[in-house]
Each structure stands twice: as structure tokens, then as C-alpha cells.
Image (cartoon, grey):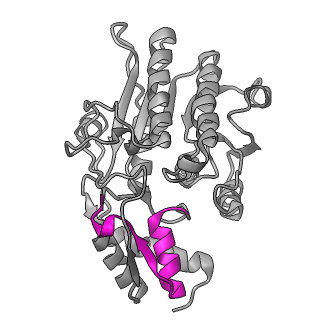
Amino acid sequence: MTILLTGAAGFIGSHVSRALLARGEQIIGIDNLNDFYRVQLKRDRLAALLAQPGFRFMELDISDREAFNSALLGEKITRVIHLAAQAGVRYSIDHPFAYTNANVTGHLTVLEFCRHLPSLQHLVYASSSSVYGGNQKLPFSESDPVNRPVSLYAATKLADELMSHTYAHLYRLAQTGLRFFTVYGPWGRPDMAMWTFTQAILAGKPIRVFNHGGMKRDFTFIDDIVAGVLACFDKPPADDKNTAPHRIYNIGNHRPEKLTYMIELLENALGRKAEKIMEPMQPGDVPETYADISAIQRDHGFAPATRIEDGIPRFVEWYKNYHGVND
């Protein structure tokens, strides 16, 4: 039995792949290795996976349906983890078609592929906390309305959830959608604040602090994300014939932290002070994210174990090692 994992060279995808390989799974990893951020980082993640038995890689774009289907023809795939997407809220403002291609057309490509697999057991896919958009009720719960996205990125991830529900209803395709909350840790994304702040502080350059520092995020360490993904992956939703076999869960740390506190912890871990430039809120951003994780706790026993006070030093240690930074 083989697992197809899209976005294998990505931050979350590479960590999930590593965890699955550690328990003896066979994986076909696919990624288009686009240049949204430095491709060498993606290749370095891949190199660590290719060094392990049980992992094969195909460079594919999920929005190219014909190439996708042709490359995977004849593969005996029973489970799929779909993490490939065009990420980033701010990037979507200037590059909208990158999001409709990857997140809408690409998601539909995966759904159509899965519905024609003769022995598919479960499709797990990535959504985002961004779907909560302009909601002001906290913490965000899966039962909250999500009809007010404030970025195109959020709108495309919401579209993914709706398409998945439709396919679960029509074709009884067992699916689980995961709304990730501000994931960080080793091998993280260079476009995210923790990376850009670390890079700037080490270089003695100022950091841009949006909303004048009045932001909160439910920072979730990558190890906890992986634990949640695997817990859901191993337990597909039952098909009781009355409701679609489709579930959506938040995966967060359930501890919103002030942006200024995150910066303070970075400063402590780096042993240097940051020069801060306070700026207004960016278009598409939200002031606070906070995950209600009671559903995934109840159904899958999820319990995040990494506090930001412990996770940030682990990220900084990895960052320094990866870049050869000496204190």
C-alpha cells in the first residue's frame, strides 16, 4: 500500500513524510518546486527524504491534470495526503492566478484523481485558519461561519473545503480537512515572520512589525502539527450514509501569543535586540488567531505539547546550524 503525498518538498509535507517513513510507510512524494521562496531549501528537504528507503519523488504540478494523471498511472495508491498549495496571504494580493491554479484547479485535480482510485481509503488535505477571515468570536471553532474571507488565499482554501464536501457527498470519498494555525519550527518557510525576523536580527537590520505590534497568533510547533496530521490520517471518517464522510478540524496550539512576545523570545534565543519599525496592518491580515481544538481532541486525542518558549529556541538552533551561523 502506497501513500501519495503532495507538497513533499514543503515545510509541513517534508516533516509529515519523515514521520511516515519512520514507521515504515511507502511514499510517492510530489512537488513542483516552484520559486515562491528559495528552491534550494526545498531541495535540501527532499535530499533528507530521498536518503531514506520507501520514498520516491516526482516533480509534478498538481494544476497540470494530464501530466499528474499520466505520471501516476498504474500506481497502487490507497491513501493520499494533499498538502501542496500556493501559500501566503500577502502574495495573493499581487499574484491571484497562482492561487486559483494551485489551490482550486490543483485541489480539483487531486479530488478527481482520488475518486477514480479503486481502493482509496482516505484523503487528508490542508486547509488554513485563514478561512475564519473577519470573524471576531474567539477561539475560532469549526462550527463558526466562514463566509467572510479577507484574502484570496483564504477564499481558495474555503473553496477547497466546499469542493471536498461535494465529492464526499457525491462519491462517498472519505476526507479530512485540516485548518492549520501559524506553523513554525525547523525547516520552516522563509516568507514567514519568525524566519524573516531571525534573518534580520542576525544581520543587524530592522524588522517590520505590523499593526504596531498589536497582533496575536496561535503559534503551533511543527512536531505538534505532524502528530495531528497522522492522528487524523489513521482514522478516516465513517460513512454512515446519512452525512458526507468529510470532517474538518483545527490544528493549533490553543494558546494565542502576542507578536511582541514572540519577538522577545527570538531576541532571547539569538542574544540580540531587534530594531523595530512599527507599521499599520497589512491588507488581508487579521489581528488575532486562536484555535478551538476541542473537536480534534475529542475525536483523535490531539494534545499539543510544545510551548512557544521551547519551540522558538529549537527553531533558532536549527536556523543557525542550517546557515552556518556562529555566535
Asked if residue 285 is positioned above or below residue 325 in the image, the reply reads above
* Outermost top residue: 241
| Quadrant in which residue 217 is drawn | bottom left
Q: Is residue 208 magenta?
A: yes
Q: Nearer the viewer, residue 252 or 160?
A: 160
The residue shown at (60%, 25%) is 108
Q: Which residues are magenta?
A: 191-216
The residue shown at (28%, 49%) is 303
Asked if residue 22 is positioned above or below residue 174 in the image, the reply reads below
The residue shown at (48%, 28%) is 159
Residue 109 relative to residue 303: left or right: right
Q: Nearer the viewer, residue 209 or 237?
A: 209
Q: Nearer the viewer, residue 22 or 235?
A: 235
Residue 175 relative to residue 242: left or right: right
In the rendering, at what x and y percent does residue 266 appear?
Answer: 38, 77
Asked if residue 196 is positioned above or below residue 22 in the image, the reply reads below
The residue shown at (60%, 35%) is 100
Q: Is residue 294 magenta?
A: no
Quadrant that contains the N terminus: top right
* Outermost bottom residue: 327
Q: Nearer the viewer, residue 327 or 230?
A: 327
In the rendering, at what x and y percent does residue 203 appear?
Answer: 54, 86
In the rendering, at what x and y percent does residue 219 appear?
Answer: 35, 59
Total number of numbered labels? Answer: 0
Residue 152 relative to residue 279: left or right: right
Asked if residue 292 is positioned above or below residue 71 in the image, the reply reads below
In the rendering, at what x and y percent does residue 133 appear?
Answer: 35, 42
| Quadrant in which residue 274 is drawn | bottom left
